[in-house]
């Protein structure tokens, strides 16, 4: 994935706290869910600096629950990130 940083120009933030497999909690700003090749990907921005976006695959568990899986495939990450950048090119400022 590219090392672009995102400057969010919107005032309102939706925060999510996720717990990893080791019990560590991290807080993220929810940016969007992007659908790509039949799967959904959660786009998050860590609340701690430096802020690089995080892309997680959404894996439905049942009607009310879902798991978030890290994506290891660099090409897939770049493709999902490109869709996100295109969708928000007029709303967010992306820095290289």
Image (cartoon, rainbow, N blue to C red):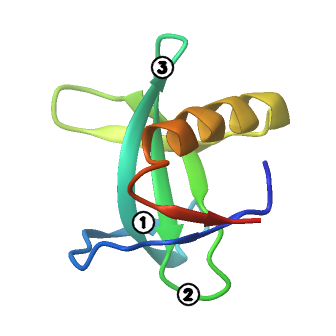
Q: How far apart are marks 3 and 1 (CA)?
A: 20 Å
Rate crowding at label 3 as few (under 14), some (14 to 19) or many (20 or more) other CA atoms within 10 Å. few
Judged from this view, the residue extending furthest toward the bottom is 49
x%, y% of residue 72?
A: 78, 39
Write down the residue under mark 2.
48
Q: Establish if 20 lies above or below 84.
A: below
Which mark is drawn over residue 92? none
The C terminus: image quadrant = bottom right
Is residue 52 toward the left or the right of residue 29 in the image? right
Q: Mark 3 points at which residue?
A: 39
Label 1 neighbour load within 10 Å: few <14, some 14-19, many 20+:
few
Q: Nearer the viewer, residue 33 or 20?
A: 33
Q: In this view, does 76 lie to the left or right of 48?
A: right
> Marks 1 and 2, how far apart in space?
14 Å
Give the mark, 1 or 2, whose residue is nearer the N terminus: 1
Along the line of sight, the residue nearer the viewer: 67 or 57: 57
Whether label 3 touches label 2, CB < 8 Å: no
Q: Which of 91 and 20 is in front in this view?
A: 91
Q: Of residues 79 and 42, which is closer to you in this image?
A: 79
The residue drawn where x is 55% and y is 12% is 37
Contact between labelled residues 2 and 1, with CB atoms less than 8 Å apart: no
Q: Which of marks 3 and 1 is nearer the N terminus?
A: 1
Report helix, strand or loop for mark 1.
strand
Q: Is mark 2 on a helix, strand or loop?
A: loop
Residue under circle 1?
Answer: 18
Q: Nearer the viewer, mark 3 or mark 1?
A: 3
């Amino acid at each position: 994935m590219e090392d672009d940083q995102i400057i969010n120009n919107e005032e309102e933030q939706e925060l999510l706290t996720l717990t990893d497999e080791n019990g560590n909690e991290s807080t993220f700003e929810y940016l969007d869910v992007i659908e790509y090749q039949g799967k959904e990907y959660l786009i998050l921005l860590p609340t701690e600096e430096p802020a690089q976006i995080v892309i997680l695959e959404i894996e439905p568990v049942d009607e009310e629950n879902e798991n978030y899986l890290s994506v290891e495939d660099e090409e897939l990450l770049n493709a999902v990130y490109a869709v996100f950048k295109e969708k928000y090119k007029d709303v967010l400022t992306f820095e290289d």
